[in-house]
Image (cartoon, rainbow, N blue to C red):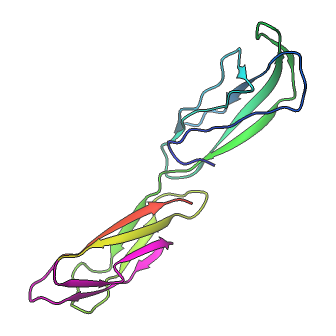
Amino acid sequence: TICNGETSDILMHSNNLTSHDIRYTWTVDDDPFITGESSSTPAGQSISEPLAQTLVNNSNGARLLTYHITPWTADPLDRLTCMGIPFDLDIWVEPTPRVNTSPGIDTICSGDRVEIAIASGATPTQPARYRYTTQVPSGITVLPGSGQDLGEGIINDIILNNTDTAKQVLFYITPYSL
């Protein structure tokens, strides 16, 4: 599993002893929501080089890519000679975490609780988590005013206004995947 926009870094290995290099080729199933995936060149690459592709998920859900990998022995000129046993390798590409918020109301009285519902705008393989901070003007107290490692639910902070004018408190909510 990798995050959206990350590079796969898959190292191959073999317990076989050969007189020359072991190489591998691959094909990958096309996914219209993923960019960056491609099949190998016909000559493949050395087993000492990782399968590294930067994968971008353009959807709101986790996407599964399947690579069909074939190992080969190579001759002294690195030409593929004897085919090994093919195998499949799956890589999940997570979507970019997103957050949907909806405050119960946008104006409250001093001492009341703000109620901001938070929910994921994406469907990763693991539930999205959130952290938040607040930007608080002078004369305002927000309790607790920040949070870490939150799941979907409601931000339910108490806002105290110690002034005689209406003030705006900004909540900065950041989604992330584990």
Q: Residue furthest left?
A: 164
> Residue 143: percent from the left, percent from the top?
33, 85
Residue drawn at the location 58% of the way across and 51% of the way down: 62
> Residue 144: percent from the left, percent from the top?
36, 83
**Is 43 or 64 nearer to us in this picture?**
43
Question: 59 left or right of 89?
Answer: left
- Residue 164, above or below 58: below
- Residue 33 seen in the figure: no
Number of numbered tags placed on the structure image:
0
Question: 51 left or right of 138?
Answer: right
- Residue 123 seen in the figure: yes
- Residue 28, above or below 33: above
Residue drawn at the location 28% of the way across and 91% of the way down: 112
- Residue 70, above or below 90: above
Dividing the picture into quadrants, the one containing residue 123 is bottom right
The span shown in magenta is 138-167
> Quadrant where the C terminus lies?
bottom right
> Residue 83: percent from the left, percent from the top?
86, 20
Q: Residue furthest bottom?
A: 111
**Is 87 or 137 nearer to us in this picture?**
137
Dividing the picture into quadrants, the one containing residue 166 is bottom left
Q: Residue furthest top?
A: 77
- Residue 93, above or below 69: below
> Residue 136: percent from the left, percent from the top?
23, 76
Q: Is residue 152 magenta?
A: yes
Q: Is residue 127 magenta?
A: no
Residue drawn at the location 71% of the way across and 19% of the way down: 44
